Amino acid sequence: MSERPGFMGYRRPDGRVGTRNHVLVVPTVICSSLVAERIAAAAAPVGTAVPHLAGCGQLGPDMRVTHETLAAYCAHPNVGAVVVVALGCEQVIAQHLADTARRHGKLVEIVAIQAEGGTVRTTEKGTRIAQGFAGALATEEREWCDISELVLSLKCGGSDYTSGLASNPTLGRVTDRLVELGGSAVLGEIAEIMGAEHVLAARATRPATATKLIRIITRVETEARSLGLDIRGTQPSPGNIRGGLTTIEEKSLGATHKGGERAPLEDVVAYAAPIARKGLTVMDTPGLDVESVTGMVGGGAQVVVFTTGLGTPTGNPIAPVLKVTGNARTARQMADNIDLDVSAIMDDSETLDAAADRLFADVLTVASGRRTAAERLGHREFAIHRRNPTI
């Protein structure tokens, strides 16, 4: 075994590495979400579904994002097999999702409610397929994988004053270490970079990357102004205000700590687009926790580290979400939801580096299969970002 850090993962035919081995049940449209959930439940514990509210009646850009996000989940390295559950008259093309999964070496089948003759028959057929896939995946074994094959999603939510002082800087040190070892990290939440965009832009390895980041920040601010909201002059979250954050700049300066201090900014990508470069990537996601995590996992992140001051239970259907808090009260009150308590940083009884060592070790054990609190509690929140009205 190499002396370099690594984890026990699943090597995929497309060359990527998974930290989980799910049978993913994908509804093409809201109308098939219930059937998909029932099929996934029958293939527990590896069965998981991504019920959503989209797939029909969407305008062009939103329809494209829906299609691309669902396809990205079908291709994801944490997925070993896919059951696509179609209705039969929707906009999302079931065959495209199945073909995407197949190109990435997944076991895949399609069931369609209208073609099968309704909910009961489709659920029965889908259940047989999913259970067969689960049996096949059970024979696959984990193997050692180098740390450079890890893509880490960096997320914060329910932030308070401890986030920027403790949990986010702790995660930032993990990000720097991961990138130095050849790995990748992705930072989203464009509105929560606003006011600190110059910090990240200064670390861009190419002028075009810095320019793209500034352009996206400007677009989000312009969109907010068109709705009568001055983001830079307000703090949109009441919870953040209660947690001691007064402006978006103050929040952003704390949030960008998650991206480390030295990791070069290598790329800026669209929502759920592939994370193709080693180093730090910024993804164009909203600040909304579930939509942001959904996009970053769609981009290829196999593990999510989610820092929180006030506490949040959010998970993901296919990627483990590891919760970290720097708030001692939250660590006590929401102990069921918290994986790592770094609140000792706040009274100087633990250094940032020591806390980062603990978090780095936790990331590797979670990547190797240890379940997070969100997984144990069954949190599988999933929501695709939508910017246009439904027609």
Image (spheres, rainbow, N blue to C red):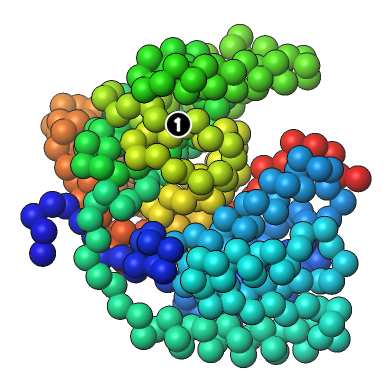
Residue 266 in view (yes/no): yes
Which one is nearer the viewer's eye here, 205 or 335? 205
Q: Residue drawn 13% across and 52% down?
A: 4
Secondary structure beneath dot 1 equals: strand
Q: Quadrant for residue 287, please give it.
A: top right
Q: Quadrant for residue 271, please give it.
A: top right
Which one is nearer the viewer's eye here, 175 or 381? 175
Q: Tell me residue 310's x, y (percent).
A: 45, 36
In this rendering, would 372 be left or right of 36?
left
Q: Residue drawn 81% across and 71% down?
A: 87
Q: Residue drawn 55% across and 27% down?
A: 190
Q: Residue drawn 70% across and 89% down?
A: 124
Residue 359 in view (yes/no): no
Residue located beneath label 1 in the image: 267
Q: Quadrant of the N terminus?
A: bottom left
Q: Tell me residue 121's x, y (percent).
A: 77, 89
Task: Residue lying at the far left in this picture: please name it.
Answer: 3
Q: Quadrant of the C terminus?
A: top right
